Every structure is written in structure tokens, then in C-alpha cells.
Amino acid sequence: MDALDVSRWQFGITTVYHFIFVPLTIGLAPLIAVMQTVWVVTDNPAWYRMTRFFGKIFLINFAIGVATGIVQEFQFGMNWSEYSRFVGDIFGAPLALEGLVAFFLESSFIGLWIFGWTRLPKLVHLASIWLVAIGVNLSAYFIITANSFMQHPVGSRFNPQTSRAELDSIWALLSNNTGIAAFWHAVAASFLTAATFVAAVCAWWMVRSKGSPDGAALYRPGTILGCWVALVACVALLFTGDTQGKLMFHQQPMKMAAAESLCHTETDPKFSILTVGTHNNCDSITRVIEVPYVLPYLAKGTFSGVTLDGAKDLQAQAVKKFGPNNYIPNLFVTYWSFRAMIGLLVIPGLFALAALWLTRRGRVPDQRWFSWFAVLTIPTPFLASISGWVFTEMGRQPWVVVPNPDGDQLVRLTVREGVSLHGAPVVWVSLLSFTLLYGVLAVIWFYLIRRYVVAGPQEHDSEPVPPTPPTDDEVAPLSFAY
Amino acid sequence: MGLQQFWFIIVTVLFLGFLVLEGFDFGVGMLMEWLARTGSGDVEQRRRAVLNTIGPVWDGNEVWLITAGGAMFAAFPHWYATVFSTLYLPLLVILLVMIARIVAIEWRGKIDDPKWRSWCDVGIAAGSWLPAILWGVAFAVLVRGLPVGPDKNVVGLSFTDVINPYTLLGGLATCALFAFHGAVFVALKTGGSVRGDAVRAAGILSLPATVLVAGFGVWTQLAYGTGWTWAVLAVAVMAQLAAVALARGGAHEGWAFLCTTVVVASVVILLFGSLYPNLVPSTLDPAYNLTIYNGSSSPYTLKVMTWAALIFTPIVLIYQGWTYWVFRKRVFAESIPPSIGLPMRREP
């Protein structure tokens, strides 16, 4: 493997790890804010206990989300220096804004939330978790804006004097239709992840706490909250996914051709349910199961009269326009990650429907199969999110800035042109260090989350601690300390 | 003043904020073990008292680094690319230990077990000592220069480009300074016996801090400084001497902390002031210097980012400052509540 491959593996591994934890953070912060709001409004202690229970789990997850995120800020410079030079005039801005607008907000107010239960007035404390929720979602917006520039460069033109792409409209950059669709899609995925987690954990506890009043008072409302949010998220994912898909068919036809294993240009091609191949290239695949009408609809919104370019034809066009190279992404990975992303959506959707049905009209289910269903559902949105990112990033290869069919064709860059000029050994050191450290931390994260889920809401979280009275007593115990 | 000069100043300010704030975070992490074991009282409660002086604020403090990196990228992409690709291995070490520190702080209290806590303490210590040294080394490397070639990339980086007497002194200086700064901070933010021990620690640390900072400051000024940076060096030295006097006095921790803050800030301004208008001086040929003129983004990008900075920086300063005000009370070892961590293994 040369330095380019090792760098790509490193970026892929560090980003996928980061995106295991981040969706849970982005989705769970608003859910906890809702739980705490319900408590503040209704004074129902069950919602306080739910807030504290999921809050602890949130903080375990938040920490590793931040920890795996700091690498990302520097990795572009470290491993993709030539990419950074080429797009920095444009790409650096959303990253800087992410820090200035989002990270400061979430990191400052999470400290206030953790330590301020008795130090802040109730509504101010409530506002701090809402600000954390806003901060993490703003962060998603800025980073998706940056990534969407890679997928569909807008608001920029190539400057031959400086040999780089330069920004000519910040508004075009921030309102990139690719970015808007991708942002809502990522947020919906995050909400699905967190809501499924909440619903499934509460469902598991409903079964486990058979006979206890907590089943009806705490876990059932938690399950119902999670399920409704999950279902709305599922619908949002389908709509935003459809929008994104239609954009991608136009903006990145090669990516979608690979996703569909469409090797040759066809009018009204069939949608592939199953394609297999002996080798990972266009000459050795067989489309085993396919259905008509679906693919034209996905691409253009009509059921017929749609011509889609195949991978081999797009390859020929690209060679003519951009020179010799392999412009076809990894077919196997693109095809299967796309399908995994969509297919996995079925599981949390079904779980939410089942859970809502089983909890209808005040019921508190106690079936063991439901408890198992819950546990097995939890990882599915995580896997779907990972599949989605693998799809969209592997599908754009070999481009790191994909040429915009409607834009300045000189704003384009391949991964090979973007990588830093290191030898492979140095990058191997970092790849192995990050993978090892992240692996260890992920195991500890899983252990902690599982430990806290299984332990359930704790005794010391049953009653809200009264606010610290303003006394001269300096040595009053803190409501929380690390 | 042009946009390129303005953004050089903004990046300086962001790194200044990072080193002032995380400077005492690193100091607290470095001193945790020592302050826990000296003096009287329960060791674990003392340890936690020290750690919790930065409890509500350390995460927000770290964002200054992230934003400084982002601002470098946005305003001076060539600087970002050259520095981070060249100082790859030192930065890798910094990142690895800072990651360890983040999870160690947050996860430490989650399990009530002495071995678990020990491991977390190792993470906190590594993530405090190593960055305190390596950031000093990194900035010294920058001021000294690197073998930048004509295409803005470094050619033939050697070990002595990164590790040499000047950069080593820089690392030792920041290490000692952050420890001193941290000790003064703990003295300001704690009460009872921990406060007294922190004052004593600050007294002990004041000597190496003064010697190393003065040495590094004078070397920087003589080798790389310009006219106006003499004034900055003077401010640094005076503030350091004032900090020493106040810290040893034992009653004016607030003023002592203000002084150590000024020292850290002055050292940063001395370094960046010596660097200006270069971003990375070339040790091969001054014609290859990466400067604010040939390393920056386009005027349009700088203008857009300027608006963003002018709007959002005051907002950040206000709410981050407010956080410090909310948690202004001193932390006593006695006010540390018992651990609410779960036992390592579930009860059967």
C-alpha cells in the first residue's frame, strides 16, 4: 500500500469511528432537552429521572465524540496538505465557523449543564441543554456544508494565478442544495439513532421492570417518545434521501451508476435488487434480480422516459474530459453500502411500530421477544449511518473534489493530487496508533454504556436536589464533581 | 491594516486564548497527583478537588485550539498545510494524549474503582504533561523556521529541525510556565488545605518557571525578535516577577493569576510577533519564506471570515466568561461529594 492508500484508510477509519458516536450526540441532546422540559413543565419526577439516566449516558458518549473529533480538525492539514492548499480558500471557512459558532456553544453550555443543576435557576439550566442541542446540530450543518462542497462544488472558481479554487460566494457555499439535503438527512439519521436508542432501552426496561410502577410511569412514556421521533425520522430519511438521490443522479452520475451496478447506458433501466459478480468490475457482474419503474423514479421522479448513463460510458466521457484515470469507484462497496444504508432502515421502523402497538392504551408489555427485538434494533441505525457515509465517500472516488457538471470544470481534484507528500511509513504509524487507541476507547465506551443502561436510573437521581441556598457556607457539597 | 495582517492577529489571539486557558488546564493535570499526595486529608478527595477547579470549563477551553486550527485553515491554508503535514509526528503525539485526557476526565468518575481511576489519572497526566512540553516545542520550531522549499512544502526535514537546544528550551519553558500558571489557578480556585498546598507549589515552581521563561524569552528576542517585541519581553519578565512575588505572598491569588495570564499571553505575542510577517520562515532561503502575503486565502474569504469573527467572537467571550462567573466559588476537598460511579462489576 502506498502513502495514498494508507492515508485513505486512516481518514476512513477515523471518520467512521467519529461517526459512531456523533449521531447519538446530535440526536440525544435534543431528546434530553425535551425530557428535561417535560419535567420542568409537569414536575413529574419520572421525567427528571429519565433526564438524569439518559444524561449520564449522553455524557459518556459526548466525551468520545469530542475526543475522536479533534483529530478531524487537523487531519486535513496533516494527511491532505495538497487538498488543503487547493480548497482551503473555501473549505477552511465552514471548519472555522464550526469552531467559532458551534463548538464553543456546545462545550461551554455542556459544562454549565453538568455542574449547574443547583447553581443555576431552573430555566437557565434548562436553556443550557437546549443550547447544547442547538450547538451540536449547528456543528453538523457546517461540517456537512464542507463535505458537500467536495461532492458538488459551488460558489467557487478556479484561479489560474494561484492554481487553486477560490470562494466567490459564501451564500452559494452555505446554501448548496447538496448540503441542505445532506444536512437534513444526517440530522434525521441522528434523530433516528438516538430515538431508537431511547425507545429500545426503555422498552428493554419495561419488560425487565415487570410489576414495578416504573414500567408505566417512566419506561412506557420514554418508549413512546422514542418511537414517535424514530418514525418521523424514518419518514424524513426517506424524503431527504430521495432528494439527495435525485441531486446525485445529476451531480455525480458515476456514483449512482455504481450504486445501481449500471454499467451501460440504458433508457428506463431496472432497479437492481441483487447483483453479484466474480470480480469487482463491470465486466464480470450479473444483475440477478431487478424491478422496473423504480430506478427512473428515484433518478428523475417519473416512471419512464429516463436515460441513465452507465459506468463504462461515464468512464469514457471522463477520460476524454479529464485525462486517463480510473473514474469508476469500488463497485462492490458502493453498491452494497448503498443498499445496507436503506435496508437497515426497516428494522428501527418496524420496531417503533411494534412498540407503539404493544404500548397502546396504557399497556406495559412484558414479552421476552420484544425485549430481544429492542436490543437487536439498537445498533441498526448506527450501522446504517456508517453505510451511508461509506457509500457517499467511496462513491465519489477517485475524486476528492468532484467536478460540478454545472460549474467551473477546473474546480476538481483527485485523491492522489490531494494527499500530503509523506512516505508511507509515517502514515502507517499514525494509522496504527489511531486505530489502536480508538479501538480500545470504543470497547471502554461500549462497556460503560452497557453498564449504565443495565444499571438503570440510580437512587441518587430519584429526587431533584434543591438549589444551593445562598449562604456563606463555602464548604457546601457540590451537586456534581468529576 | 490589511486583511492579511488582521488575520495574523486573529490567529495569534486564538492561540493566545488556547494557551492561556488550556495552559492552566495542563497545569492542573500536571499537578493533580502532587497536590493530592502532599498535605493532609483524603488523597482522592484532594485529587478530585484539584481536577474540579477546571471541571466546568476545560472543554470550552479546548475549543480555542480547534478554532485556532480552523482559522489557520480558513485564513492561511498554506500555513495550515505546511505546518501540520510537516510537524506530523509531534502533532500526532499531542493528539493521542489529548484524546486520552478528554475521555479520562469525563469517564474517571463513572466507575467507582481505584484501578480504573489510576488509569484515568495516567491519561490525564499524559494529556497534560506532553502537550505542555510539545506545544512549546512546536511554536519554537515555527519561529526558528523549517526547510521550506519553493513550492511551500518542506524538503528534507531532519531531526534537528524539530529537536534542538532552542526548541527544547521552548518546551521546558512552556512546561514550567503552565505548571506555575496551573498552581496559581488552583490556589485561586480552591479553599482549605488544598489552597495552602497550591500556594506552596506555586512558590516552588516559580523559580524554574522564571528562569526558563526568561531564558527562552531572551533567546527568542535576540535570535528572532524585532524592535517592538522588546517591550513584550519586558512585560513578560515584569509580569512573571510580579506573579512570583504575589504567589509567594499567599494572599493575592487573583492578582497572581492575572500576572501569570499576562506572562503566557506575552510569550505568545513575543513568539508570533517575532514570526510576523512570516508564517513559516524558510531555513533554506528567505525567498522561500511562507508569509502572510503568499500563504493566505483570497481577499473575499478573509473579508467573509472577518465579518464572522467580529460578530461571533464577542458572543463567545461573553458566554464563556459568564461560565467562569457562575462557577467562581472555591472548591474545597470537603465539598467533593462521594463517588457516584457504578462498581466495576455488576452485583450478581
Image: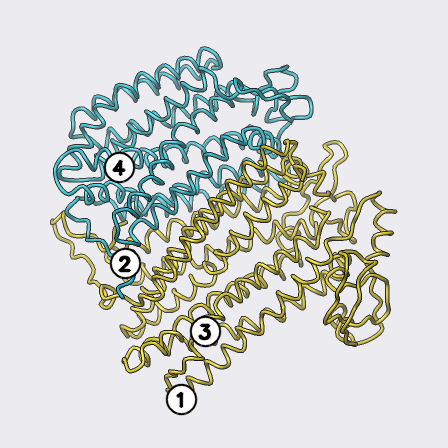
Chain colours: A yellow, B cyan
Q: Nearer the viewer, residue A405 or A74?
A: A74
Distance from Cα at disc 2 to Cα at disc 4: 23 Å
Mark 2 in CB contact with mark 4 (< 8 angstroms) = no
Q: Earlier along the polypeptide chain: callout 1 or callout 3?
A: 1
Distance from Cα at disc 3 to Cα at disc 4: 43 Å
Q: Mark 1 falls on what kind of element? A: helix
- Amino acid type, label 3: Ala
- Amino acid type, label 4: Met
Mark 1 in CB contact with mark 3 (< 8 angstroms) = no
- Give the chain of mark 2: B
Q: Nearer the viewer, mark 1 or mark 2?
A: 2
Is residue B223 shown above or below B330?
A: above
Residue A311 position in % (x across, y down): 81, 58
- Give the chain of mark 3: A
Read off the residue under disc 3. Answer: A374
Distance from Cα at disc 4 to Cα at disc 1: 55 Å
- Amino acid type, label 1: Arg
Is residue A237 shown above or below B124?
A: below
Quadrant for the N terminus of chain A, please.
top right
Q: Nearer the viewer, residue A397 or A441?
A: A441
Q: Which mark is residue B32?
A: 4
- Give the chain of mark 1: A
Read off the residue under disc 1. Answer: A361
| Discs 1, 3: same chain | yes
